[in-house]
Amino acid sequence: APVMSISVRPASNPDSEKMMAALHHLADEDPTFVVSVDEETSETILSGMGELHLEVLVERMKREYGIVATVGRPEVAYRETATLITEGQYKHIKQTGGRGQYGHVVLKLEPMDAGRGFSFVTEVKGGRIPSEYIPSVEKGVIKAMAKGPYAAYPVVDMRVTVTDGTYHDVDSSEFAFTEAARVCFRTLFLKGHPVLLEPVMSIEVSMPEEFMGPVAGSICQRRGRIESMDDVGDLKVVSGMVPLSEMFGYSNTIRTITSGRGSFTMHFERYEAVPFAIAEEVVKKRREANLIR
């Protein structure tokens, strides 16, 4: 899955349709490149495997299709998950004359191992929630997970079990159960000590030996962990792990500290929890931008 996004818009409005056609052609060639439109801002969003990947695609759009684009600031594809098991209930009840709305669910949220995704389980007994409403409960949970309650990033690695609930013969509906599940999930998730997850990259930097100290320092300054230092021919190779959010502009850094004689490769490895202080800063900025509802 993509780990970084940028917004793009054509330098001239008449190029909008041409730009979208070009981007879809590029996406057809590259399964790691995703084009989408932000529903709230109507911006075109390009998502890929890193800064260089997206820079190359924007350059190709200019070179092969003649479209110059204005590029927004890169955004890291954070995720969020809970760390504690939580259980609770929510009743969605509205009465505004005529037919009302009634949906009542009892949910259990459990964090799963990293990379496990999402699991929805039904343990409702005796028709306490009619079977035709169970898909609506799942729909409400998925809706809540798409923009998580903590930082409005997708929620991952959760098992959600609907254990009980009640319904009303007249007022219950698919919508009412979707809303009950959505609100119940959001409330319980925030009680489960949520954490922010960030993409962590494996990195290899090659350089002449005299630059090894500054290169190692540049990785550590970016919250990186050095895992090995090896000889490959006449060069030294430093390998490690580093958060993607700290790697913007790293190609310029390497060029500067090695006098143009160093190079690096970087690949997505896994998601890891963001340190609390940094996570709080990310959440604060998103609140100030009205991205968390």
Image (cartoon, helix red, strand yellow):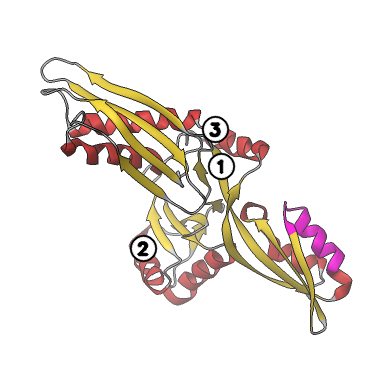
* Label 1 residue SS: strand
At x 63%, y 52%, the residue is: 245
* Amino acid type of the residue tagged 3 in the rendering: His
| 3 vs 2, front mark | 3
Q: Is residue 20 visible?
A: yes
Magenta range: 212-225
Residue 216 covered by magenta stretch = yes
Residue matched to label 2? 20
Residue matched to label 3? 193
Q: Earlier in the sequence, mark 1 or mark 2?
A: 2
* Amino acid type of the residue tagged 2 in the rendering: Met
* Dot 3 crowding, Cα within 10 Å, few <14, some 14–19, many 20+: some
Residue furthest bottom as drawn: 233
Q: Which mark is residue 205?
A: none
Q: How far is mark 1 from mark 2, CA to CA? A: 32 Å
* Amino acid type of the residue tagged 1 in the rendering: Leu
